[in-house]
Amino acid sequence: MRTFLFFTTLLSTIISSSARADQDIQIRVSVPEQRLYLFDGDKKIATYRVSTSAFGLGDSYGSYATPLGRLVVASKVGDGAEIGAVFKGRCRTGEVCAINAAGRDPIVTRILHLRGTEKQNSRAYSRGIYIHGTADERRIGTPASYGCIRMKSSDIVKVFNTVGVGTSVEITDQRIGSGLFNFVSHSTSRTPKVATKVR
């Protein structure tokens, strides 16, 4: 019985520690830079080129704009799907689309469905705002989407495997890589901590 209790306590500790570690992972998207950054606490751990909306910023229905502010990953779709797997309505169609296939622009590979946490992005979930793979990789790095944040398939797989449901996402119209963007970290401590400038 004691052995069982010991291993149960140990497993609970491991799970709890993992949950805390996951909460430290944060996504930041800079619209002017067309970059997605992964932070572990205050430390930048990865940078990827992305495409935000070709129609500007906002959260109105029918605007095709990218919403600003704080959001969270509401769900993850596509775990284990092959590179280029096509999704429609967050369901696989059975098709696999080649990178930069002529005349094609589907959602592919992985989807992170976002939910807004502020008034300025409260429609994001119902509008179907995602971070997702795109077959149209030629335009990555320029505003080209219909509101979502597009990534190369190889990059969205890495992000998908790093973050969990509930991960904090912030989309900003400020530059991050230049060091001009400070954010309040979602720390597990009660006292908010302000990140140092990113270099």
Image (tube, helix red, strand yellow):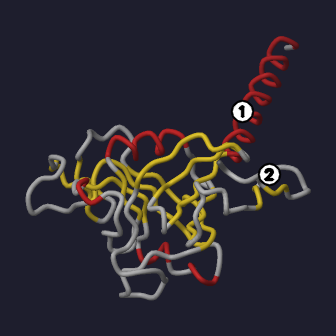
Q: Position of residue 166 (x, y in %)?
A: 62, 55
Mark 1: secondary structure: helix
**Which labelled disc corresponds to residue 15?**
1
Q: Is residue 72 above or below residue 162?
A: below
Q: Residue furthest top?
A: 3
Name the kind of residue labelled 2 in the image.
Ser
Of the numbered discs 2 and 1, the one sitting upstream in the chain is 1
- Choose between 58 and 48: the one closer to the eye: 48
How far, Cα to Cα, is label 2 from label 1?
18 Å
Compared across the picture, whether 71 is left or right of 1 comes to left
Residue at left 32%, top 57%? 140
| Mark 2 lies on residue | 187
Disc 2 crowd rating (10 Å Cα; few below 14, some 14-19, many 20+) is some
The quadrant holding residue 93 is: bottom left
Most foreground residue, 59 or 193 = 193
Q: Where the N terminus falls, by quadrant?
A: top right
Closer to us: mark 2 or mark 1? 2
Q: Quadrant of residue 56?
A: bottom left
